[in-house]
Image (cartoon, rainbow, N blue to C red):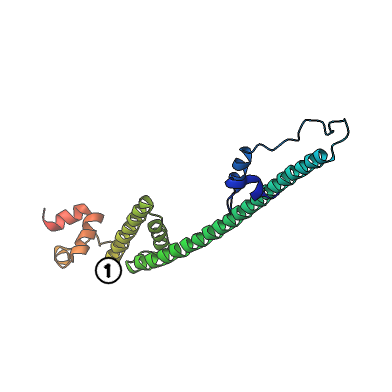
Amino acid sequence: MTLAELLKDNYKEGMSLEDVTKALEGIEFPKADPAPATGAGGEPNPMQSYETEKLKAAVSKANAEAAKLKRELQARMSEEERREAERKAKEDEVNEKLAELQRAKIVSDTKAQYLALGYEASLADRAAEAAADNDHGTLFLVQKQHQDALVKKIRAEILKSTPKPNGGSQAVPKDLTREQFANLSYMERLNLFNENPELYKELQGE
């Protein structure tokens, strides 16, 4: 007896394990006739014994086929699940690598933009990383550091370009005359005022 013969109207092509299990639950397997396998005169009834053994064999075969089908369906489902897991893992790996490449491209392009704005290389690196990660806190901090460095640089350039007073830091003579005082430059007079305010006031006529 095949599974189709056993399930009869409940059998369908391509049944899943769950479908087969549910269909088998609704089947009552025939049992052997409890009447003694003997004739009217108490002699053995060969036909009755034959039918009983035939029925037992059919039920046993049907049960074996149902169990086999269950195992095959379970194996097929497990294989499909394994393949699906492998496919998902490969897909995740590809997506992860793609995301890494995209992020690296964004960081590279953004760093070039910050370098073009005059950022130092280290600050440009940090700013580009923060921008790629949407880390606004770090980005604002890096921008402030760049601004502070820029102000410091401008101040240094201004001091560097400022002309130094003639004579450098040489002390102004204490016996300076009013005529000599009148010929001093602004920076020289400032130097005299800082070094000898009393003489400065005297020559200034205060």
Q: Which of the pair 179/52 is nearer the observer?
A: 52
Compared across the picture, whether 190 is left or right of 57 comes to left
Residue 184 placement: quadrant: bottom left
Is residue 121 among what the camera can see?
no
For this rendering, which residue is in front, 16 or 117? Answer: 16
Q: Secondary structure at mark 1?
A: helix
Q: Is residue 189 left or right of residue 54?
A: left
x%, y% of residue 165?
A: 25, 66
Above or below, comparing residue 131 to residue 51 in the picture: below
Residue that badge 1 annotates: 161
Image height check: is 36 above or below 112?
above
Quadrant of residue 148 in the image? bottom left
Q: Is residue 155 visible?
A: yes
Work out whether residue 100 or residue 132 is closer to the camera in this orientation and state it: 100
Residue at 15% over, 54% down: 201
In depth, the one of 156 and 87 nearer the eye is 87
Q: In the displayed structure, does residue 157 sit left or right of residue 62?
A: left
Residue 117 position in % (x across, y down): 32, 66
Query: In the picture shown, does residue 144 fall above or below 55?
Result: below
Is 144 placed above or below 107 here? Answer: above
Q: Quadrant of residue 31?
A: top right
Task: Residue at 35%, 67% (x, y): give it.
Answer: 113
Residue at image point 39% right, 61% down: 128
Counting other residues with Cα less than 10 Å from the Cα at mark 1, is it few (<14), some (14-19), or many (20 or more)?
few
Amino acid at circle 1? Ser
Residue, far left: 205
Q: What x and y, as percent, mark residue 197?
A: 21, 53
